[in-house]
Image (cartoon, rainbow, N blue to C red):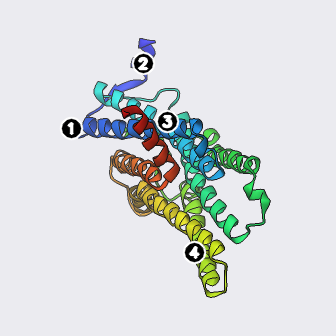
Amino acid sequence: MNLRFISNSSTIDIESWFIPFNILTIVLTILTIGLSILFLFLILIDKQCHTIPMMLIANSCLTALVFGCTMLACFIFILENDLKQIQYQDSLCIFRAYIAYATCGVFDYSFLLQALYRYVIVVYPNCLFWQLPRNQILLIVLTWILGFLFPVVFLFTDEIIYNVDNQVCQLPLRFSFSVNYIAFSVYTLPVLLIIIIYMKLIRYVKQMSDRVTPVRILFRAERELKMVRRILILVIILIGVGFVYAIFIFMSFFTDPPKHHFRIAYVFGSVSFLLVIITLFLFTKPLKISIENKLNRLFQ
């Protein structure tokens, strides 16, 4: 085993900022994973959280947990290589990249499901399909399947390669169909659809307010619009996850991106990812009430 390790590795130069940045991304990711587990546990044990909206939020937390664990494994691998000052591609490197692409897409689409649910129950309140838990579970499963299908082609085309300077397996950033395809399907498409849903819901609520609409119905529509607005805020934070990465992609169309572009993008992504989970908690009243109740019982 040691011989194989030595034969597949070689010494490289390590910048002084590598280790602190590695530790920072690991700490931020562990915090995100911990919060995701906490929120999932609260949703599971608290009967007040057993609703369709909370089920959709639980799906977001679950995808965050899987994505976070995948990235944590990636960051630990980078740190280990940097500490040993070697370049080494293990057998799971490409598979981790595939899981990261897939779960990142599922995470983005989980917010699309939340926005779509809020839109339909306002615009089509008599559509029972969207109000049945089993149908929402079906849609959740569908997004997971699609999320894992989008990047599966890269497992068989050898396009995901080991980047020595960043100690990670990724699609090389350049003007190519693969880079544009993964960026559009995993990130751009769900974000655009959420923005469209928000704009259409704004127009619909405005039309309701202009007409003679019962106060109860108008209040509910405005409440759901507020929830979609909060989802949009989460998406704006998600844009922070991909903003630096998107800059490097755009740059790669014309010139080579910075040597350590993935390392830089991972730091910004880890910060934004944690902020999304924290903001999701702040925007989810049942979760806040559940934690407050648990704390009150603990300190009584």
In the image, what residue type sits under mark 2?
Answer: Phe
- Residue 218 picture location, percent across and down: 62, 75
Q: Which mark identifies residue 37?
A: 3
In the image, what residue type sits under mark 1?
Answer: Ser
Q: Which SS class for mark 4?
A: helix
**Pick the front one: 221 or 229:** 221
In the image, what residue type sits under mark 4?
Answer: Met
Q: Which residue is mark 1?
A: 16
For marks 1 and 2, give the one nearer the viewer. Answer: 1
In the image, what residue type sits under mark 3?
Answer: Ile
For marks 2 and 3, give the one nearer the viewer. Answer: 3
Vertical order, 205 against 131 (above or below) = below
Q: Would you call the spot at circle 4 few (<14 residues within 10 Å), some (14-19), or many (20 or more)? A: some
- Residue 98 picture location, percent across and down: 56, 40
Q: Earlier in the sequence, mark 4 or mark 1?
A: 1
Vertical order, 75 against 126 (above or below) = above
